[in-house]
Image (spheres, rainbow, N blue to C red):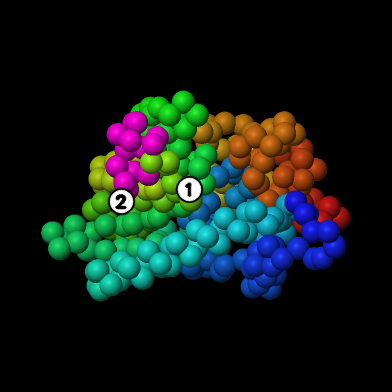
Amino acid sequence: MDRSPVPVPMLTSLLVDAIHEANQAEGKRPKAFDTLFRASDAGKCARQIAFGSLGYEETEPMDFAGTWVTTLGTRIHEMWQTTLLADYPDAEIEVKLRHGDLLSGHADAVVVMPEGIKVMYELKTMGSYGFDKAMGLMRKSWSRKEPEGPRLSAILQGSMNALAAGADLLVIGIIGLEAMSKGYAEKVGASDLDRIMGEWHYSREEFEPLALAELQRLEEVKGWLDAETLPPRWGIGEDGRSTEFSPENGQQFPCGYCGYRSACIHYGAAPVTLDLVRRRSHAIQ
Ligand code: SF4
């Protein structure tokens, strides 16, 4: 909103402009190891994973809003990791983990607790929509339902990292970017910390089967690439079931946030040979 009587350039956007420019100059963060996929591909659509693995340039790169939210998340991670090391000097941060040549990633932290329990820790920062779902908050009616916990993609990513780290326990923490109001928290009996964060613990009996199932799904995605074919628009829906996505139907999850949406629509739902994708990739960027 411009309330200035004399037109001047926008000042508020200076920071996000600078961050956006720096990110573009830096490019995508390299994988932890030279593997086909990233651990952060966990739970994603098979075709989206394939585009990323092929090094296909995003047709919808991250916008300013995405850049801002991601930067806030990165800063919070860095501050949390610094604090962790102050309290647990033997902890490891940004731990490089891999499952053979299939995938690799950087885990937020691995720490052996004084009780001898090896913890693989993942932190997720969230805007109010995701935070409310995870914590079971219904802000409009000032009520609370059963918390849904972390997103399935976060649990799958954490599970694969925990398995690779040989952890006893997977811990996923959530920090919201917006606090519950004091009045609302009082009404639903939320504690001071509940207003801004939550934490979930998963035993090896819980995370191992999830990790193995996701590794098997990623092997299937690899199978499509080995067959020189762009995978179908297939992934895991918000309900955890196998789902076929329709990017043509507006901005629905996950397509609305997919960096390859235009490319995906361009190629259509039918199988496409990678040869055709490689030949056409320049034409649609
Ligand atoms: S637009 Fe949707 S279906 Fe297409 S690659 Fe992205 S997430 Fe998958």
Name the residue rendered at 61%, 40% in the picture: 254
Name the residue rendered at 78%, 54% in the picture: 2
Residue 25 against residue 105 in the figure, above or below: below
- Given the current orientation, which residue lies at the most extreme left position? 115
The C terminus sits in image quarter: bottom right
The amino acid beneath tag 2 is Leu
- Given the current orientation, which residue lies at the most extreme front position? 5
Residue 240 against residue 75 in the figure, above or below: above
Residue 209 in the image, given as x and y percentages of width and height: 34, 41
Q: Which mark is residue 170?
A: 2
User: Dividing the picture into quarters, in which one does residue 161 lie?
Assistant: bottom left
Q: Is residue 193 magenta?
A: yes
Q: Say whether residue 50 is left or right of residue 100.
A: right
Neighbour class for label 1 at 10 Å: few (<14), some, many (≥20)?
A: some
Name the residue rendered at 33%, 35% in the picture: 186
Q: What is the spatial separation of the Cα atoms under label 2 and label 1, in whole angstroms? A: 25 Å
Residue 258 in the image, given as x and y percentages of width and height: 65, 46
Name the residue rendered at 53%, 51% in the picture: 41
Residue 261 in sight in this render: yes
Residue 44 in the image, given as x and y percentages of width and height: 55, 45
**Residue on which the image places disc 1:** 178
| Magenta stretch prevailing secondary structure | helix
> Quick one: label 2 or label 1, which is nearer the N terminus?
2
Residue 170 in the image, given as x and y percentages of width and height: 30, 51
The mark tally for this picture is 2
* Residue range (magenta): 183-195
